[in-house]
Amino acid sequence: MNRQREPSGCARYELRIVGHLDEHWSTWFGDMDLTREDDGTTTLRGSVTDQAALHGLLAKVRDIGATLVSVTSTDSAGHAGGNSG
């Protein structure tokens, strides 16, 4: 599967979890942007260097006991590239 990459070689992802996280969690999640959504979820958006880093983020979601709703790969224009969850 061919995904568009940012010039740095990173891929952009959105992870959506149940509940609202405080902004201080952005450091724990590698400086991902956190958005508290109106539906009671939090969306984490940002660049991920490789699959190992993505798995690390998923492990952090697990470690704080959050429920993962979705993982979406996005291109630089912000359009969905794929989804699982």
Image (spheres, helix red, strand yellow):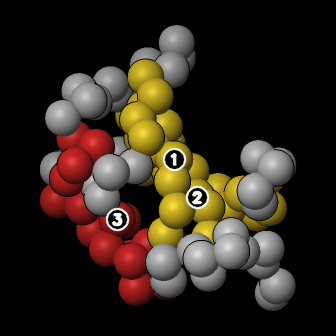
Contact (Cβ within 8 Å) of mark 2 with mark 3: yes
Label 3 – label 1 distance at C-alpha: 11 Å
- Secondary-structure class at tag 2: strand
Residue at coordinates 39% horizontally, 77% vertically from top-left?
A: 53
- 44 w.r.t. 51: above or below: above
Label 2 – label 3 distance at C-alpha: 10 Å
Picture quadrant where residue 40 is located: top left
What's the amino acid at mark 1?
Arg
The one of 62 and 44 positioned closer to us in this rendering: 44
Q: Which residue is mark 3?
A: 57
Considering the image in quadrants, where does the C terminus appear? bottom right
What's the amino acid at mark 3?
Leu
Residue at coordinates 82% horizontally, 50% vertically from top-left?
A: 77
Residue at coordinates 49% horizontally, 83% vertically from top-left?
A: 51
Picture quadrant where residue 21 is located: top left
The one of 25 and 15 positioned closer to us in this rendering: 25
Label 2 crowd (10 A; few <14 / some 14-19 / many >=20): many
Q: Which residue is mark 2?
A: 13
Mark toward the viewer: 3 or 1: 1
- Secondary-structure class at tag 1: strand
Considering the image in quadrants, where does the N terminus appear? bottom right
Would residue 8 appear left or right of 36 to someone viewing this image?
Answer: right
Contact (Cβ within 8 Å) of mark 3 with mark 1: no
Q: Which residue is mark 1?
A: 45
Residue at coordinates 61% horizontally, 81% vertically from top-left?
A: 9
- Secondary-structure class at tag 3: helix
x then y, percent, for residue 80: 79, 52
Q: Which mark is residue 35?
A: none
